[in-house]
Image: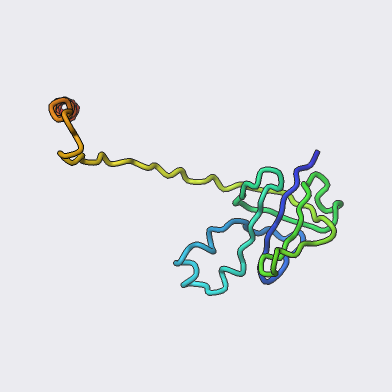
């Protein structure tokens, strides 16, 4: 059974059977906006209708099922119109390539505890700090 997607577009519908990029990368990038002020309007956002997941990649679309016989269903929505006015008939989409999302590593820095908040655990805290410091020094060697 084919999957269903929603394709949000701005300014103009995508041209049938022409490969284009979907995703929000160009819209959020200040560098691209500086180079090309119309970049925002060239952005298409593809969203899985069932899960709501946004997909970035290369796609082709067509209003005719015959053009993409193994394609999935896509509903076009005008991003600029209030409420995202949609097409009455589905189009068809083939995802050629999905861009992998770069994973962001978040490192939490240890916070220092104020002496007034330790309330009797100061010696245990200082011992723990000493052990951690010794471990770090051993790892450096």
Q: Is there any visible trace of residue 77 in the rendered image?
A: yes
Quadrant occupied by the C terminus: top left
Picture residue at 37% right of the left edge, 42% below the top: 106
Classify the position of the N terminus by image quarter. Answer: top right
Question: What is the x, y in percent for residue 8?
Answer: 68, 60
Residue 75 falls left or right of residue 39: right
- The residue depicted at 80 percent of the width and 44 percent of the height is 70
* Rendered image quadrant of residue 7: bottom right
- Counting from the top left corner in percent of width and height, residue 104 is at 42, 44
The answer to whether 44 is drawn above or below residue 5 in the figure is: below
Whether residue 14 is visible here, answered yes or no, is no
Q: In screen coordinates, is 112 left or right of 64?
A: left
Q: Of residues 125 and 104, which is closer to you in this image?
A: 125
Q: Residue 109 appears in which quarter of the rendering?
A: top left
Name which residue lies at 62% across and 67% down.
Answer: 42
Looking at the image, residue 43 lies above or below residue 59: below
């Amino acid at each position: 059974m084919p999957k269903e997607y929603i394709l949000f577009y701005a300014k103009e519908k995508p041209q049938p059977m022409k490969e284009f990029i979907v995703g929000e990368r160009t819209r959020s990038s200040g560098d691209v906006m500086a180079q090309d002020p119309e970049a925002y309007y060239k952005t298409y956002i593809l969203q899985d209708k069932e899960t709501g997941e946004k997909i970035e990649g290369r796609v082709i679309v067509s209003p005719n099922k015959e053009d993409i016989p193994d394609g999935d269903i896509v509903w076009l929505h005008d991003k600029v119109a209030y409420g995202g006015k949609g097409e009455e008939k589905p189009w068809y989409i083939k995802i050629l390539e999905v861009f992998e999302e770069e994973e962001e590593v978040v490192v939490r820095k240890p916070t220092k505890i104020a002496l007034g908040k330790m309330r009797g655990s100061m010696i245990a805290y200082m011992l723990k700090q000493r052990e951690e410091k010794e471990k770090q020094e051993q790892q450096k060697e």
